[in-house]
């Protein structure tokens, strides 16, 4: 069916239903679901990808601690590993990144 005919039929159907031509009537459920579920989708995707995000965070934190001379080897216990870099500040990270850019 040609686009012009389809547009004409759509307008006639809206008129038949007593609606203005600009009124949105026929929608794709996927579009509506995307609108309403967008926030939930972000949460679900983040939950799925959380291990990867955490790995990046932990890896960066350990690397920054090494670059700052705070550790020379990785601790053996999980608790100690997670505490590596606790004392790193945003200024420390900015300084390391600035040094990378200028070198």
Image: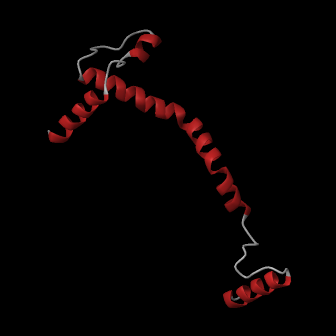
Q: Position of residue 2 (x, y in %)?
A: 69, 89
* Depth check, front residue: 71 or 25: 25
Q: Residue at x 67, y 50 (%)?
A: 37
Percent x, y of residue 66: 27, 21
102 relative to 44 in the view: left or right = left
Residue 47 % position (x, y): 59, 36
Q: In front: 80, or 14?
A: 14
Residue at x 35%, y 29% (from the top left corner): 60
Residue drawn at x 73%, y 68% is 27
Q: Is residue 1 visible?
A: no
Q: Residue furthest top?
A: 77
Give whichever of 36, 75 is nearer the camera. 36
Circle count:
0
Q: Quadrant of residue 28?
A: bottom right
Outermost residue toward the left in this view: 103
Left or right, 56 with respect to 28, comes to left
Q: Is residue 10 above or below residue 31?
A: below
């Amino acid at each position: 069916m040609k686009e012009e005919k389809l547009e004409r039929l759509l307008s006639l159907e809206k008129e038949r239903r007593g609606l203005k031509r600009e009124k949105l009537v026929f929608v794709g459920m996927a579009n509506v679901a995307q609108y309403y579920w967008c926030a939930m989708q972000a949460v679900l995707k983040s939950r799925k990808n959380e291990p990867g995000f955490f790995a990046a965070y932990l890896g960066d934190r350990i690397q920054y601690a090494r670059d700052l001379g705070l550790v020379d080897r990785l601790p053996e216990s999980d608790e100690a590993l997670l505490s590596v870099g606790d004392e790193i500040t945003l200024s420390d990270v900015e300084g390391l990144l600035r040094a990378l850019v200028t070198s």
